[in-house]
Amino acid sequence: METIPLQQETEDYSFLPLIHDIIKCMDKDSPDVQQELNKLKTKIQETREQILAMPGIETNLEQQQQQLQTLTEQVHTKNQLLHKYKGLCMFDIPKA
C-alpha cells in the first residue's frame, strides 16, 4: 500500500469567509458576486482533490475494517513482546 505524506499547510480551509463575501456582494448588488462565486467553486474543487489524494480513500469499508483489525493485532503482539522482553531482563538499569 502506498503512503502519501501529509502536507502541513497554514492555509485556512473554511468556506465561511467566502460565503460571507458572496452574501455581502449580493446585498450591495455588486458586480463582484460572480468573482466571489468562482473563488468558492475553486476552493471546493481544491478540497475535493485533496480528499481524493488522501491515503485509504479508495478502499471500501470492509477493507478499512480489515486493515484496522490487522493493525490492532500488530499493536497487541508488539505489546506482548515488549512485556515479555521486560520480564527477561536480567540486569537492573540504574536510575539517574
Image (cartoon, rainbow, N blue to C red):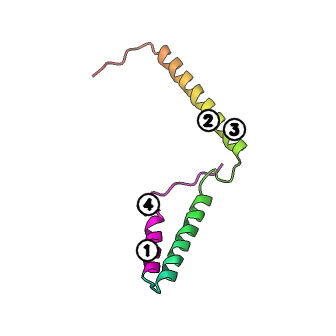
The location of residue 38, given as percent across then percent down, is: 53, 78
Q: Amino acid at mark 2?
A: Leu
Side of 86 where 51 appears, left or right: right
Q: CA distance from mark 3 to mark 1?
A: 45 Å
On-image quarter of the C terminus? top left
Provide the residue designation for mark 1: 21
Label 1: element kind: helix
46 to the left or right of 12: right
Badge number at residue 66: 3
Q: Amino acid at mark 4?
A: Glu
Q: Nearer the observer, disc 1 or disc 4? A: 1
Whichever of callouts 3 and 4 sits on the residue coming sooner in the sequence is: 4
Measuring 43% from the left and 64% from the top, which residue is drawn there? 11
User: In front: 20, or 78?
Assistant: 20
User: For the residue carrying disc 4, how many other residues have a C-alpha within 10 Å: few (<14), some (14-19), or many (20+)?
Assistant: few
Q: Which residue is mark 4?
A: 9
Q: Which residues are magenta?
A: 1-27
